[in-house]
Amino acid sequence: MEKEQKEKLHAVRIPCNSTVKNYTFATLKRLGLDEKPGKVYNDIVSGNGAIPKSVYAATTKAKTLLEMIPKFHPPVPVTAAEMQEYDALIEQWGTYIKTQMNDAFSVIYLCDEVNKVLQKKNSTVRCQRKHLVWCLSLLGESAMTPKGVADAILRYDGTDWENLPQLENDDKYYVRLNDDSDEEKQKFLDTVEFIYALSSSAADASLVEKIQNDIEVLTEFSRWGDALTDYKYVERYKEFAGRLQTLPAALSKKFKVTKKQIKSAAPKKQEMTQEDEQCATTTEKEEVMESPANESTEQPSVDEQTTDSSATVESPSVMEEHKQIDGVSVENDDIPQQSNEDIEGNDSQHEPEQWELNQMELTDYINEFTRNDETGKNKIKEVKDYIDAFCKFKDFDAEFADLKRIVDNYQKRFKGGFIAGVIKNKVMEHESTEQQ
């Protein structure tokens, strides 16, 4: 079918202005669309919408991942209840991946966005293509934003826009179209030139990398059953799940918490500085010198070791090395080690509260934008209390989704300060609503 459509197309030359043509190519590149305007035009007019090149790659990789997801079961015997949980995870994960495979996005035109600004400013002027060509030629590409163009139109309020001289067409587009009529050529120009953005539902720019990561994790997972050394599987499975990056948020939170618990449960090796070592050596020498010459240096037997209530309280680091069991001091090596299952079964004092889970998710999201933005990092630090309050919202999931929608529509490169402002405003709105 696609081959037949291509055979119907034929080469067409469309006159255009070189400044506008260069801007069009730059815009398509910025939006991640195909560098060939003819391809973009045919995608849009055929009803498929604008399709970023990254989406092609994401869709291809997502199909591969969807084939692997149903095999995400431990390669060992499991209980019926566990199998039900694994099946539910697989179903939710697969459904979520399918929702991310949005192949096409509607186009937002600069002219329409400029008119929204002009209407808010109560201007009777309505932006047309000639305004955009004029603004681009006079002020350059940096001015080609809704506010930038609108401000320019209002600033040049003495202009007779109806009789504005038009720039000459000093270049051409070479494209493949259904026909070479003047109507088709003008339709091409109206469709491809002065696109401003894609719909806010556009895919996550890092989706390809996340999907590729999960393909590699599942590939490694598939080899697990080929080299079993034991039948223990609970923690091993959770470790694989904790490395996945395309799980739905609720499932991702669950495995992040598990990973955090396992990590915090592992004993930490306390390193001594050179100064500490010298201090410890000096203390040992002093203790030996203070001991009576006729006193045996042998350690007392276990029966002779009793708890002295008047003894000096030991530092936390020392207390970690000795435990009191039935009044007898023993080394850590003598204490039966807890399994991971025992650790997870401890009392709830180590279990993160829901707002802390929200904070983990929000922090991961913010870090994506402030990694190379020192100003943004400082702005985020300034609103720490507001971030804590935001994470405690009862409707956090809905507000977080709205935050991401707003940020997606923000066109500037560095978004850290903008995110800080949005969070602060949302918290203030919540507080205002609660006071009413």
Image (cartoon, rainbow, N blue to C red):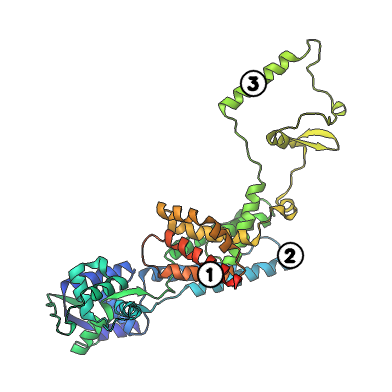
Label 1 vs 3, first from the N-terminus: 3
Q: Which residue is nearer to you in this view: 328 or 423? A: 423
Q: Position of residue 409 (x, y in %)?
A: 41, 70
Tally of marks:
3
Q: Nearer the viewer, mark 3 or mark 2?
A: 3
Please report the residue visible at 24 percent of the width from the left and 67 percent of the height from the top.
Answer: 141
Q: Residue furthest right?
A: 303
Residue tagged 3: 281
Do labels 3 and 2 touch, CB within 8 Å?
no
Tell me, for residue 429, which label it has, or none: 1
Tell me, for residue 79, which label it has, or none: 2
Report which quarter residue 354 is drawn in.
Answer: bottom right
Q: Position of residue 177 (x, y in %)?
A: 24, 84
Between the C-alphas of marks 1 and 3, the distance is 61 Å
Q: Secondary structure at mark 3?
A: helix
**The N terminus sits in image quarter:** bottom left
Q: Which residue is nearer to you in this view: 118 or 339? A: 118
Q: In the rendered view, does 181 fall on the left or right side of 347?
A: left
Do labels 1 and 3 touch, CB within 8 Å?
no
Please report the residue visible at 43 percent of the width from the left and 59 percent of the height from the top.
Answer: 416
Q: Secondary structure at mark 1?
A: helix
